[in-house]
Amino acid sequence: MDARSHPIAPTAEEDTTDTLLLWVLVWSELAAFGILLAGFLLVGLVQPDAYAAARLHLDPLLAGINTLVLLTSGWQAALATRPRASLGQRRRALVNAALLGFAFVAIKLFEYSTEAGVAGDPAYGSFFELYFLVTGFHLLHVAFGALVLLIVAWRPAPGNVALITTLWHVIDLVWIVMFPLVYLV
C-alpha cells in the first residue's frame, strides 16, 4: 500500500488553525456589513425625506422573493453538511445551493435595472449610492459564494463543505438583517 491509499488526518493544531481562520473570516464579514449598514442607517436619519421618497422605487415583493430564494439556498447548503449524506447527495445539495444563489443574482440584477433610471435623481439624496453599495457588496458575495459552492461540489471534502456552508449562512444572515433595514424600515 502506498501513502495515497491512506488519508492523512489533520493534526489538532491544523484543525484549530482552520477553525480560527474560518471564524476570523466570518467576524470580519459581519463587521464589514455591519459598518455598511450602520452608515446606510445613519445617513437615513440625516435624510429621512429623501430616503422615504427613494424607497417608493424599491420593490419589497421582489426582494421578499429573493429572501426566500436565498434561504432555500441556505437550506440546501445545510443538507450538504449532514454526516450521513452520500457523496452524490452532498454534491447535489451544493449545486442546488449554488443555482439558487445564481437565481438570487439574476433577480437582483433585474431589480437593479428597474431602479437604475431613478438612481441619479438628487431628490433622493445619498440613498441610491448607499443602497447600491450595500446591496451590491452583498450581491458580489452571493455570486462569488455560489461559484465556490460549485467548485466545492466538484470535490466535496468535509472541511471545504463546512467552510463554504458556514460562509454561505453568514451571507444569508446578512441578507436577513439587510432586507428589513433597506426595504421595510
Image (cartoon, rainbow, N blue to C red):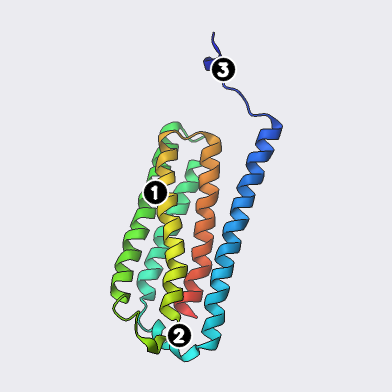
Earlier-in-chain disc, 3 versus 1: 3
Please say whether residue 82 is visible from this viewpoint.
no
Q: Marks 2 and 1, how far apart in space?
A: 33 Å
Give the SS element for disc 3.
Answer: loop
Report the amino acid beneath label 1.
Ala
Q: Marks 2 and 3, how far apart in space?
A: 60 Å
Give the SS element for disc 1.
Answer: helix
At 59% from the left and 61% from the top, the residue drawn is 30
Q: Quadrant of residue 131?
A: bottom left
Earlier-in-chain disc, 2 versus 3: 3
Task: Residue 6 in the image: state x and y as whole percent.
Answer: 56, 17
Give the SS element for disc 2.
Answer: helix
Number of labels in the image equals 3
Quadrant (top left, top right, bottom left, bottom right) of the N terminus: top right
Residue 51 has which mark? 2
Task: Residue 73 in the image: state x and y as whole percent.
Answer: 43, 53
At 70% from the left and 32% from the top, the residue drawn is 12
Task: Residue 14 in the image: state x and y as whole percent.
Answer: 66, 34
Report the amino acid beneath label 3.
His
Q: Which residue is mark 3?
A: 6
Residue 98 has which mark? 1
